Amino acid sequence: MTSILAAVATLVVGMSGGPPPDEARVQTSDGWLQGVVAADHRSFQAIPYAAPPVGPLRWRSPQPAKPWQGVRDATRPGQRCTQSNFQGGVTGGEDCLFLNVTTPLGARKGLPVLVFVHGGGLVTGAGDAWNPRRMVQHDAIVVTLNYRLGAFGFLKHPSLDDPYAGNFGLADQQFALRWVRDNIAAFGGDARNVTLWGQSAGGVSVCSQLASPGARGLFSKAIAQSAPCGNAVLDPATAVERGLAFASFAGCSTEACLRGLPASQLVRHSDRAETFQVHRYATGKTWMPVAGTRALPLQPLTALQLGLAADVPLLHGGTKHEVRAHVTFSGQPVDYPKVIKGMFGKEASRILSAYPAGSNPGLTLATALTDYGAMVGACTQLPALKAASRGAPAYGYEFAEPAVRQFEGWPPSATHGADMDFLLDLMPTSFTPGQKAFADRLIGHWVAFAKNGDPGWPVYQGGIVQSLAAAQTGPIDLAREHRCGFWQTIR
């Protein structure tokens, strides 16, 4: 009997062409990877999608990664891109162009792919910080990635002649998307069904990629969270002015000098603080993509309005109380009239009349700037949604569920970043049963959009978007809720 069973087993193996596949191993165009098979997902980390941008490749467009022999260990995160840490030091390094692939278990093919671009003001963050294990349970593959940050990713200086000068971070993201196009089928993904997805600075990146010729055809859908595509990025003159100021800070005036400095001398610790302060415009942040360049010829909104952006389905929205996080970071107490006068000049009296300070000036400031939306918030989403809807389906939303972790001294808020705990795991989170059910529904909406371009509610029209909260989900008039008619009169 034993010999008969052995013969049958041998026959089965022969018919299948070999032993059952090892789910922890995948072959890419550059070589084999050894990942991790967990109880409910597979993960492959620290996959190089481009050559290390070090030495002569600093401030150059990304170049192909070097293939490897044997099996590469993909069980641990790769180095993060150079950035300031919270203690005033420098962490990470320049050899950082890695991505991570997380898949459900089981041999599957043709799964939708979400490529997530992390936030962090374009000065901090990393792809491996976000664990998509819950999302892949909905039959999707999630790719997270690192891209060059701060001066390494967004410096525009007259001595830099690379076509992506000022936009090296965008070039990295495009290179990662090409890697996904060429390799994701080996993980079970559909290279023709890739959704580019970003939150905060990652959302700014998505808006920019919609308008970038170099990204055309690399993704079939887009999700921009908490980064209105109606907001401008930098113009070349401002970017060069900032580049010269940065070079002066570093003690250099030439490309050769800048290239010769150690990475630690090319990080300004003030960048992190300035990025998360309150500004009137998104371009008040230290580093931003640069429009009016070969890499990004037009501002994202202009490209959308002229029909020159990628015609792909767009899921676009933000949180209900975006700027409360920024006001909190800026510190209390807030001199509300002084801040408004400094930002809006002669228009300040109208704003102070429409938004009286009340008993909590910081809360009033956050409410006004969230409504205005020119840094981040509500009203600047609407022209982008309107323009995008002319070429492809566009879906608006407002995330209204209070954050799992609240700021002390503030009412329960759906502030900037509140949505991310419900989608990806940044740190251990304890959900109530209601929150867990809501998180599952929210992930279901995002994956449904990635699968077929429809999150499960009507397309955008006339200021109406979908409000998303545990207790109640349904259409709301975003323009009315955030007084966009008033803000259209502010110049």
Image (spheres, rainbow, N blue to C red):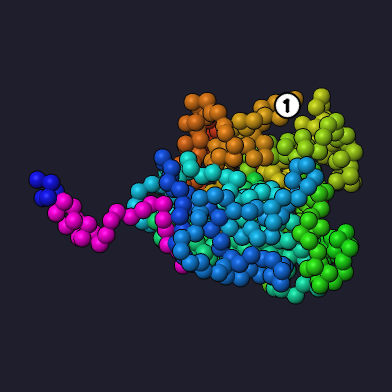
The residue lying toward the viewer, choosing from 194 and 271, is 271
Camera sees residue 354: no
The residue lying toward the viewer, choosing from 298 and 287, is 287
Residue 224, image x and y in percent?
60, 51
The residue at the point 81 percent across, 53 percent down is 268
Magenta stretch in the rendered image:
6-29
Residue occupied by mark 1: 408
Q: Is 240 covered by the magenta stretch?
A: no
Camera sees residue 172: yes
Residue 193, image x and y in percent?
45, 58
**What amino acid is found at the position of numbered circle 1 in the picture?**
Glu
The residue lying toward the viewer, choosing from 436 and 490, is 436
Residue 400, image x and y in percent?
60, 34
* 248 is higher (above) or lower (below) than 9: below
* 396 is higher (above) or lower (below) than 252: above
Q: Secondary structure at mark 1?
A: loop
Packing grade of label 1 (10 A; few <14, some 14-19, many >=20) is few
The residue at the point 71 percent across, 69 percent down is 55
